Image (cartoon, helix red, strand yellow):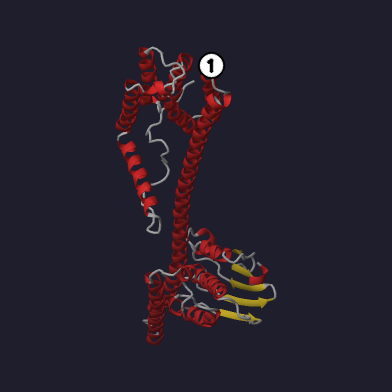
Amino acid sequence: MTVSHRTSPQAEGSDPGAPDHDWSAGAHPLTRNVERGIQWARSVDRRRPLVWDLLLTGFFVVVAFTDVAGGGWRHIAENKEADVWLVYAMTAAFSVPLLWRRRHPLAVYGVMALASLFNTWSGAVIQAALTQLIVLFNIAMRLHTRTLAWTYVLIGVPLVVGRLRYPQGGWDQQVVPTMMSFAIVALMGIAVRTRQEYMASLVQRAKQLEVERDQQAQLATNAERTRIAREMHDIIGHNLSVITTLADGGSYAAAKSPERAAQALTAIGGTSRQALTELRRLLDVLREEAPQSPQSAQSPQSSPEAAALAPQPALTDLDQLIDGVRAAGLPVRSTVRGRPDSLPAGRQLTVYRVVQEALTNTLKHGGPDATAHVEVVYGDDGVRATVTDTGGGGGPPVADSGGRGLTGMRERTALYDGTLEAGPLRLPPGGWQVVLHLPKESAQ
Protein backbone atom coordinates (compact mmCIF):
# COMPACT_ATOMS: atom_id res chain seq x y z
CA MET A 1 0.00 0.00 0.00
CA THR A 2 1.30 3.45 -0.91
CA VAL A 3 1.17 6.02 1.86
CA SER A 4 1.20 9.69 0.91
CA HIS A 5 3.79 11.86 2.57
CA ARG A 6 2.53 14.97 4.29
CA THR A 7 4.02 18.18 3.01
CA SER A 8 4.37 19.69 6.48
CA PRO A 9 4.72 16.99 9.15
CA GLN A 10 3.58 17.85 12.60
CA ALA A 11 4.04 16.51 16.06
CA GLU A 12 1.76 13.75 17.30
CA GLY A 13 -1.51 15.27 18.41
CA SER A 14 -0.86 18.54 16.61
CA ASP A 15 -3.67 20.42 14.94
CA PRO A 16 -2.75 21.95 11.58
CA GLY A 17 -5.97 23.90 11.33
CA ALA A 18 -5.86 25.62 14.69
CA PRO A 19 -3.88 28.85 14.99
CA ASP A 20 -1.27 29.25 17.69
CA HIS A 21 -2.64 31.38 20.50
CA ASP A 22 -2.57 31.82 24.26
CA TRP A 23 -5.60 30.84 26.24
CA SER A 24 -7.70 33.53 27.84
CA ALA A 25 -6.73 35.05 31.15
CA GLY A 26 -9.64 33.23 32.81
CA ALA A 27 -8.11 29.79 32.19
CA HIS A 28 -6.34 27.87 34.95
CA PRO A 29 -2.56 28.57 35.07
CA LEU A 30 -1.78 24.88 34.56
CA THR A 31 -4.03 24.81 31.50
CA ARG A 32 -2.32 27.87 30.04
CA ASN A 33 1.13 26.40 30.63
CA VAL A 34 0.19 23.09 29.01
CA GLU A 35 -1.33 24.88 26.01
CA ARG A 36 1.76 27.04 25.61
CA GLY A 37 3.96 23.95 25.71
CA ILE A 38 1.85 22.26 23.04
CA GLN A 39 1.96 25.37 20.87
CA TRP A 40 5.73 25.56 21.25
CA ALA A 41 6.11 21.90 20.26
CA ARG A 42 3.89 22.46 17.22
CA SER A 43 5.87 25.48 16.12
CA VAL A 44 9.14 23.57 16.44
CA ASP A 45 7.68 20.67 14.49
CA ARG A 46 6.47 22.94 11.69
CA ARG A 47 9.77 24.75 11.40
CA ARG A 48 12.13 21.80 11.95
CA PRO A 49 10.27 18.51 11.40
CA LEU A 50 13.51 16.52 10.97
CA VAL A 51 14.94 17.92 14.19
CA TRP A 52 11.79 16.94 16.05
CA ASP A 53 11.89 13.40 14.62
CA LEU A 54 15.58 13.03 15.50
CA LEU A 55 14.98 14.21 19.06
CA LEU A 56 12.03 11.89 19.60
CA THR A 57 13.76 8.90 18.01
CA GLY A 58 16.98 9.59 19.86
CA PHE A 59 15.15 9.74 23.17
CA PHE A 60 13.56 6.30 22.72
CA VAL A 61 16.78 4.79 21.36
CA VAL A 62 18.71 5.93 24.44
CA VAL A 63 16.01 4.76 26.85
CA ALA A 64 15.58 1.39 25.13
CA PHE A 65 19.27 0.56 24.92
CA THR A 66 19.85 1.76 28.49
CA ASP A 67 17.17 -0.67 29.65
CA VAL A 68 18.82 -3.52 27.73
CA ALA A 69 22.34 -2.67 28.87
CA GLY A 70 21.22 -2.49 32.50
CA GLY A 71 19.48 -5.83 32.29
CA GLY A 72 16.14 -4.39 33.26
CA TRP A 73 14.36 -6.46 30.64
CA ARG A 74 15.14 -9.66 32.61
CA HIS A 75 12.76 -8.65 35.45
CA ILE A 76 9.67 -9.15 33.25
CA ALA A 77 11.01 -11.62 30.68
CA GLU A 78 9.43 -15.02 30.23
CA ASN A 79 12.85 -16.34 29.19
CA LYS A 80 15.64 -14.66 31.10
CA GLU A 81 18.26 -16.63 29.13
CA ALA A 82 17.39 -15.13 25.74
CA ASP A 83 20.36 -14.28 23.51
CA VAL A 84 21.63 -10.78 24.26
CA TRP A 85 22.46 -10.09 20.61
CA LEU A 86 18.84 -10.88 19.71
CA VAL A 87 17.64 -8.54 22.44
CA TYR A 88 19.82 -5.72 21.06
CA ALA A 89 18.63 -6.39 17.50
CA MET A 90 14.99 -6.28 18.59
CA THR A 91 15.64 -3.09 20.58
CA ALA A 92 17.06 -1.43 17.45
CA ALA A 93 14.10 -2.66 15.38
CA PHE A 94 11.66 -1.14 17.87
CA SER A 95 13.36 2.24 18.33
CA VAL A 96 15.35 3.30 15.25
CA PRO A 97 12.47 3.04 12.70
CA LEU A 98 10.58 5.72 14.66
CA LEU A 99 12.49 8.23 12.54
CA TRP A 100 10.31 7.29 9.53
CA ARG A 101 7.04 6.73 11.39
CA ARG A 102 5.27 9.66 9.71
CA ARG A 103 6.46 9.22 6.16
CA HIS A 104 6.17 5.41 6.03
CA PRO A 105 4.00 4.34 8.97
CA LEU A 106 2.96 0.97 7.52
CA ALA A 107 6.53 -0.03 6.64
CA VAL A 108 7.72 0.95 10.11
CA TYR A 109 4.89 -0.95 11.71
CA GLY A 110 5.70 -4.01 9.59
CA VAL A 111 9.30 -4.00 10.88
CA MET A 112 8.07 -3.61 14.44
CA ALA A 113 5.49 -6.41 14.02
CA LEU A 114 8.23 -8.77 12.88
CA ALA A 115 10.39 -7.71 15.83
CA SER A 116 7.39 -8.20 18.12
CA LEU A 117 6.96 -11.77 16.83
CA PHE A 118 10.61 -12.55 17.69
CA ASN A 119 10.13 -10.76 21.00
CA THR A 120 7.24 -12.97 22.16
CA TRP A 121 8.73 -16.16 20.61
CA SER A 122 12.05 -15.66 22.38
CA GLY A 123 10.35 -14.76 25.66
CA ALA A 124 12.52 -11.67 26.17
CA VAL A 125 9.44 -9.36 26.26
CA ILE A 126 11.55 -6.20 26.12
CA GLN A 127 9.73 -2.97 26.98
CA ALA A 128 10.92 -1.28 23.78
CA ALA A 129 7.98 -3.04 22.12
CA LEU A 130 5.76 -0.31 23.58
CA THR A 131 7.04 2.03 20.84
CA GLN A 132 4.49 0.30 18.61
CA LEU A 133 1.92 2.50 20.38
CA ILE A 134 3.49 5.61 18.81
CA VAL A 135 3.31 4.13 15.31
CA LEU A 136 -0.25 2.92 15.89
CA PHE A 137 -1.20 6.43 16.97
CA ASN A 138 0.21 7.84 13.71
CA ILE A 139 -1.68 5.24 11.66
CA ALA A 140 -4.94 6.01 13.46
CA MET A 141 -4.44 9.73 12.95
CA ARG A 142 -3.42 9.69 9.28
CA LEU A 143 -4.56 6.55 7.46
CA HIS A 144 -7.88 4.98 6.55
CA THR A 145 -9.93 3.28 9.26
CA ARG A 146 -9.81 -0.03 7.38
CA THR A 147 -6.00 0.09 7.46
CA LEU A 148 -6.15 0.75 11.19
CA ALA A 149 -8.41 -2.30 11.67
CA TRP A 150 -5.96 -4.63 9.87
CA THR A 151 -3.09 -3.14 11.84
CA TYR A 152 -4.90 -3.79 15.09
CA VAL A 153 -5.54 -7.41 14.08
CA LEU A 154 -1.83 -7.78 13.31
CA ILE A 155 -1.03 -6.77 16.89
CA GLY A 156 -2.70 -9.86 18.26
CA VAL A 157 -0.62 -12.37 16.29
CA PRO A 158 2.61 -12.02 18.33
CA LEU A 159 0.57 -11.97 21.55
CA VAL A 160 -1.15 -15.25 20.68
CA VAL A 161 2.21 -16.80 19.72
CA GLY A 162 3.72 -15.73 23.04
CA ARG A 163 0.71 -17.07 24.96
CA LEU A 164 0.99 -20.46 23.23
CA ARG A 165 4.77 -20.69 23.69
CA TYR A 166 4.79 -19.54 27.32
CA PRO A 167 1.41 -20.55 28.78
CA GLN A 168 2.29 -19.77 32.41
CA GLY A 169 -0.04 -16.77 32.57
CA GLY A 170 -3.66 -16.58 31.52
CA TRP A 171 -5.10 -14.83 28.46
CA ASP A 172 -6.36 -12.06 30.71
CA GLN A 173 -2.76 -11.38 31.77
CA GLN A 174 -0.78 -11.79 28.55
CA VAL A 175 -3.15 -10.74 25.76
CA VAL A 176 -6.15 -8.71 26.99
CA PRO A 177 -4.24 -5.84 28.76
CA THR A 178 -1.99 -5.28 25.74
CA MET A 179 -4.91 -5.32 23.30
CA MET A 180 -6.82 -2.86 25.50
CA SER A 181 -3.81 -0.54 25.65
CA PHE A 182 -3.48 -0.58 21.87
CA ALA A 183 -7.24 0.03 21.49
CA ILE A 184 -7.09 3.09 23.77
CA VAL A 185 -4.17 4.53 21.79
CA ALA A 186 -6.01 3.91 18.50
CA LEU A 187 -9.09 5.70 19.88
CA MET A 188 -6.89 8.61 20.93
CA GLY A 189 -5.50 8.84 17.41
CA ILE A 190 -9.02 8.78 15.95
CA ALA A 191 -10.08 11.50 18.41
CA VAL A 192 -7.15 13.73 17.46
CA ARG A 193 -7.82 13.11 13.78
CA THR A 194 -11.50 13.99 14.22
CA ARG A 195 -10.56 17.22 15.99
CA GLN A 196 -8.10 18.11 13.25
CA GLU A 197 -10.69 17.56 10.54
CA TYR A 198 -13.29 19.50 12.53
CA MET A 199 -10.93 22.42 13.04
CA ALA A 200 -9.95 22.32 9.37
CA SER A 201 -13.64 22.47 8.42
CA LEU A 202 -14.10 25.45 10.74
CA VAL A 203 -11.14 27.22 9.17
CA GLN A 204 -12.50 26.47 5.70
CA ARG A 205 -15.91 27.72 6.75
CA ALA A 206 -14.38 30.89 8.16
CA LYS A 207 -12.53 31.50 4.90
CA GLN A 208 -15.72 30.87 2.95
CA LEU A 209 -17.58 33.34 5.15
CA GLU A 210 -14.83 35.91 4.58
CA VAL A 211 -15.17 35.44 0.83
CA GLU A 212 -18.96 35.75 1.06
CA ARG A 213 -18.59 38.83 3.24
CA ASP A 214 -16.26 40.43 0.69
CA GLN A 215 -18.68 39.51 -2.09
CA GLN A 216 -21.60 41.00 -0.18
CA ALA A 217 -19.57 44.15 0.46
CA GLN A 218 -18.73 44.35 -3.24
CA LEU A 219 -22.37 43.88 -4.19
CA ALA A 220 -23.40 46.55 -1.69
CA THR A 221 -20.75 48.88 -3.09
CA ASN A 222 -21.93 48.30 -6.65
CA ALA A 223 -25.55 48.85 -5.59
CA GLU A 224 -24.60 52.08 -3.87
CA ARG A 225 -22.66 53.23 -6.92
CA THR A 226 -25.68 52.48 -9.07
CA ARG A 227 -27.93 54.42 -6.71
CA ILE A 228 -25.56 57.39 -6.71
CA ALA A 229 -25.32 57.23 -10.50
CA ARG A 230 -29.13 57.34 -10.72
CA GLU A 231 -29.31 60.31 -8.36
CA MET A 232 -26.58 62.19 -10.22
CA HIS A 233 -28.20 61.44 -13.57
CA ASP A 234 -31.62 62.61 -12.39
CA ILE A 235 -30.32 65.77 -10.72
CA ILE A 236 -27.78 66.87 -13.30
CA GLY A 237 -29.56 65.56 -16.39
CA HIS A 238 -32.88 67.22 -15.64
CA ASN A 239 -31.50 70.57 -14.51
CA LEU A 240 -29.00 70.82 -17.36
CA SER A 241 -31.75 70.05 -19.86
CA VAL A 242 -33.86 72.85 -18.40
CA ILE A 243 -30.88 75.22 -18.38
CA THR A 244 -30.04 74.35 -21.99
CA THR A 245 -33.62 74.96 -23.12
CA LEU A 246 -33.77 78.27 -21.24
CA ALA A 247 -30.42 79.38 -22.63
CA ASP A 248 -31.49 78.59 -26.20
CA GLY A 249 -34.77 80.46 -25.73
CA GLY A 250 -33.03 83.38 -24.05
CA SER A 251 -30.47 83.76 -26.82
CA TYR A 252 -33.26 83.65 -29.41
CA ALA A 253 -35.31 86.30 -27.57
CA ALA A 254 -32.37 88.53 -26.63
CA ALA A 255 -32.53 90.61 -29.80
CA LYS A 256 -36.34 91.03 -29.96
CA SER A 257 -37.48 90.84 -26.33
CA PRO A 258 -34.84 91.72 -23.73
CA GLU A 259 -37.41 91.19 -20.98
CA ARG A 260 -37.94 87.56 -22.03
CA ALA A 261 -34.19 87.08 -22.14
CA ALA A 262 -33.86 88.49 -18.62
CA GLN A 263 -36.59 86.11 -17.43
CA ALA A 264 -34.74 83.21 -19.01
CA LEU A 265 -31.52 84.22 -17.26
CA THR A 266 -33.37 84.47 -13.95
CA ALA A 267 -34.84 81.00 -14.47
CA ILE A 268 -31.38 79.66 -15.37
CA GLY A 269 -29.99 81.07 -12.14
CA GLY A 270 -32.78 79.55 -10.07
CA THR A 271 -32.44 76.16 -11.75
CA SER A 272 -28.66 76.20 -11.31
CA ARG A 273 -28.95 77.04 -7.61
CA GLN A 274 -31.51 74.26 -7.15
CA ALA A 275 -29.19 71.77 -8.88
CA LEU A 276 -26.24 72.87 -6.73
CA THR A 277 -28.34 72.54 -3.58
CA GLU A 278 -29.37 68.98 -4.45
CA LEU A 279 -25.79 68.05 -5.35
CA ARG A 280 -24.50 69.44 -2.05
CA ARG A 281 -27.12 67.43 -0.16
CA LEU A 282 -26.13 64.29 -2.05
CA LEU A 283 -22.42 64.85 -1.40
CA ASP A 284 -23.10 65.58 2.28
CA VAL A 285 -24.76 62.20 2.56
CA LEU A 286 -21.73 60.53 0.92
CA ARG A 287 -19.39 62.27 3.36
CA GLU A 288 -21.35 61.12 6.39
CA GLU A 289 -19.34 58.69 8.52
CA ALA A 290 -20.64 55.14 8.86
CA PRO A 291 -22.53 54.50 12.11
CA GLN A 292 -20.67 52.65 14.86
CA SER A 293 -23.45 50.76 16.60
CA PRO A 294 -25.03 47.62 15.08
CA GLN A 295 -28.48 49.19 15.31
CA SER A 296 -27.44 52.29 13.41
CA ALA A 297 -25.42 50.21 10.93
CA GLN A 298 -28.58 48.42 9.90
CA SER A 299 -30.39 51.66 9.10
CA PRO A 300 -27.86 54.39 8.24
CA GLN A 301 -30.59 56.80 7.14
CA SER A 302 -32.62 56.47 10.34
CA SER A 303 -31.19 59.53 12.10
CA PRO A 304 -32.92 62.89 11.64
CA GLU A 305 -29.65 64.50 10.51
CA ALA A 306 -29.13 61.92 7.75
CA ALA A 307 -32.77 62.20 6.69
CA ALA A 308 -32.47 65.96 6.48
CA LEU A 309 -29.42 65.70 4.26
CA ALA A 310 -30.77 62.95 1.99
CA PRO A 311 -31.70 64.29 -1.49
CA GLN A 312 -35.22 62.82 -1.51
CA PRO A 313 -37.82 65.02 -3.16
CA ALA A 314 -41.41 64.04 -2.38
CA LEU A 315 -44.61 64.24 -4.40
CA THR A 316 -45.31 67.59 -2.77
CA ASP A 317 -42.40 68.89 -4.86
CA LEU A 318 -44.01 67.71 -8.09
CA ASP A 319 -45.71 71.06 -8.74
CA GLN A 320 -42.37 72.84 -8.38
CA LEU A 321 -40.83 70.41 -10.85
CA ILE A 322 -43.62 70.98 -13.39
CA ASP A 323 -43.35 74.76 -12.96
CA GLY A 324 -39.66 74.58 -13.74
CA VAL A 325 -40.33 72.57 -16.89
CA ARG A 326 -42.98 75.05 -17.94
CA ALA A 327 -40.51 77.87 -17.40
CA ALA A 328 -38.16 76.05 -19.75
CA GLY A 329 -40.78 76.30 -22.52
CA LEU A 330 -42.60 72.93 -22.36
CA PRO A 331 -46.36 73.27 -21.80
CA VAL A 332 -47.32 70.72 -19.13
CA ARG A 333 -50.74 69.81 -17.76
CA SER A 334 -51.03 67.91 -14.52
CA THR A 335 -53.83 65.85 -13.03
CA VAL A 336 -53.86 64.27 -9.58
CA ARG A 337 -56.58 61.83 -8.53
CA GLY A 338 -56.98 60.46 -5.05
CA ARG A 339 -54.83 61.04 -1.99
CA PRO A 340 -51.37 59.69 -1.21
CA ASP A 341 -52.52 58.19 2.13
CA SER A 342 -49.04 58.38 3.68
CA LEU A 343 -47.19 56.89 0.70
CA PRO A 344 -43.68 55.90 1.90
CA ALA A 345 -40.86 58.30 1.10
CA GLY A 346 -39.06 55.76 -1.10
CA ARG A 347 -42.08 55.29 -3.35
CA GLN A 348 -42.64 59.06 -3.51
CA LEU A 349 -39.03 59.53 -4.61
CA THR A 350 -39.44 56.84 -7.31
CA VAL A 351 -42.59 58.50 -8.72
CA TYR A 352 -40.92 61.90 -8.62
CA ARG A 353 -37.76 60.72 -10.40
CA VAL A 354 -39.67 58.84 -13.10
CA VAL A 355 -41.84 61.88 -13.85
CA GLN A 356 -38.73 64.07 -13.82
CA GLU A 357 -36.88 61.79 -16.24
CA ALA A 358 -39.87 61.53 -18.57
CA LEU A 359 -40.26 65.32 -18.74
CA THR A 360 -36.51 65.73 -19.21
CA ASN A 361 -36.60 63.42 -22.22
CA THR A 362 -39.55 65.34 -23.64
CA LEU A 363 -37.50 68.54 -23.33
CA LYS A 364 -34.53 66.91 -25.05
CA HIS A 365 -36.27 64.93 -27.79
CA GLY A 366 -39.84 66.17 -28.08
CA GLY A 367 -39.21 69.04 -30.47
CA PRO A 368 -40.30 72.69 -30.29
CA ASP A 369 -44.07 72.04 -30.50
CA ALA A 370 -44.27 69.26 -27.93
CA THR A 371 -46.66 69.32 -24.98
CA ALA A 372 -46.89 67.00 -22.00
CA HIS A 373 -49.50 65.69 -19.61
CA VAL A 374 -48.69 64.29 -16.16
CA GLU A 375 -51.33 62.20 -14.41
CA VAL A 376 -50.88 60.72 -10.93
CA VAL A 377 -53.58 58.39 -9.61
CA TYR A 378 -53.70 56.97 -6.08
CA GLY A 379 -55.85 53.85 -5.88
CA ASP A 380 -56.44 50.79 -3.78
CA ASP A 381 -53.82 48.88 -5.73
CA GLY A 382 -51.08 51.50 -5.32
CA VAL A 383 -50.00 54.58 -7.25
CA ARG A 384 -49.91 55.01 -11.00
CA ALA A 385 -48.11 57.84 -12.81
CA THR A 386 -48.53 58.47 -16.54
CA VAL A 387 -46.48 60.98 -18.52
CA THR A 388 -47.63 61.51 -22.12
CA ASP A 389 -46.15 63.92 -24.63
CA THR A 390 -46.91 64.91 -28.18
CA GLY A 391 -43.32 65.17 -29.30
CA GLY A 392 -42.68 64.44 -32.92
CA GLY A 393 -38.90 64.29 -33.12
CA GLY A 394 -35.83 66.32 -32.50
CA GLY A 395 -33.66 63.42 -31.41
CA PRO A 396 -33.72 59.71 -30.72
CA PRO A 397 -36.25 58.47 -28.18
CA VAL A 398 -35.10 57.55 -24.70
CA ALA A 399 -35.18 53.83 -25.44
CA ASP A 400 -32.71 54.27 -28.29
CA SER A 401 -30.50 56.98 -26.88
CA GLY A 402 -28.06 54.64 -25.19
CA GLY A 403 -28.21 56.63 -21.96
CA ARG A 404 -29.20 55.66 -18.43
CA GLY A 405 -32.64 57.29 -18.46
CA LEU A 406 -34.87 54.29 -19.11
CA THR A 407 -32.47 51.94 -17.29
CA GLY A 408 -32.54 54.13 -14.20
CA MET A 409 -36.33 54.30 -14.24
CA ARG A 410 -36.62 50.52 -14.50
CA GLU A 411 -34.11 50.00 -11.68
CA ARG A 412 -36.01 52.34 -9.39
CA THR A 413 -39.29 50.63 -10.24
CA ALA A 414 -37.89 47.15 -9.61
CA LEU A 415 -36.92 48.12 -6.07
CA TYR A 416 -40.62 48.20 -5.16
CA ASP A 417 -41.82 45.34 -7.40
CA GLY A 418 -43.48 47.84 -9.70
CA THR A 419 -43.94 47.92 -13.46
CA LEU A 420 -42.78 50.47 -16.00
CA GLU A 421 -43.94 50.73 -19.58
CA ALA A 422 -42.34 53.20 -21.95
CA GLY A 423 -42.74 53.51 -25.70
CA PRO A 424 -44.04 55.54 -28.64
CA LEU A 425 -47.73 56.12 -29.23
CA ARG A 426 -49.46 55.16 -32.42
CA LEU A 427 -49.87 57.70 -35.19
CA PRO A 428 -51.86 59.82 -35.12
CA PRO A 429 -51.33 61.72 -32.88
CA GLY A 430 -47.96 60.16 -32.02
CA GLY A 431 -45.73 61.05 -29.13
CA TRP A 432 -44.28 59.11 -26.25
CA GLN A 433 -45.76 57.65 -23.07
CA VAL A 434 -44.31 56.43 -19.79
CA VAL A 435 -46.58 54.53 -17.40
CA LEU A 436 -45.38 53.68 -13.87
CA HIS A 437 -47.26 51.51 -11.37
CA LEU A 438 -46.11 50.87 -7.81
CA PRO A 439 -48.19 48.46 -5.70
CA LYS A 440 -49.04 49.20 -2.12
CA GLU A 441 -46.48 48.08 0.43
CA SER A 442 -48.87 45.56 1.99
CA ALA A 443 -49.52 43.98 -1.42
CA GLN A 444 -45.88 42.88 -1.90
Q: Is residue 329 above or below residue 297?
A: below
Towards the viewer: 237 or 12: 12
Position of residue 145 in the picture relative to residue 56 (left or right): right
Q: Residue furthest bottom?
A: 259
Residue drawn 35% across the image and 12% down it: 85
Towards the viewer: 132 or 300: 132
Q: How far across and down, in percent of the image, does residue 114 sit? A: 46, 16
Towards the viewer: 181 or 249: 181
Towards the viewer: 36 or 320: 36
Residue drawn 44% across the image and 54% down it: 214
Q: How far across and down, in percent of the image, does residue 159 sit? A: 52, 21
Q: How far across and down, in percent of the image, does residue 37 sit? A: 34, 44
Q: Is residue 87 above or below residue 295?
A: above
Q: Residue furthest right?
A: 380
Evaluate whether residue 397 shows in this view.
no
Residue drawn 38% across the image and 22% down it: 97
Look at label 1 and name its amino acid: Val
Q: Which residue is mark 1?
A: 161
Position of residue 441 in the picture relative to residue 207 (left or right): right
Q: Is residue 366 above or below residue 138?
A: below
Evaluate whether residue 402 shows in this view.
yes
Q: Is residue 164 above or below residue 338?
A: above
Quadrant of residue 53 within the rendered picture: top left
Q: How far across and down, in percent of the image, does residue 427 sit? A: 64, 65
Q: Which element carries disc 1, helix, strand or loop?
A: helix
Q: Quadrant of the C terminus?
A: bottom right
Q: How many marks?
A: 1
User: Local crowd at mark 1 within 10 Å, few (<14), some, or many (≥20)?
Assistant: some
Quadrant of residue 411 within the rendered picture: bottom right
Position of residue 262 in the picture relative to residue 146 (left or right): left
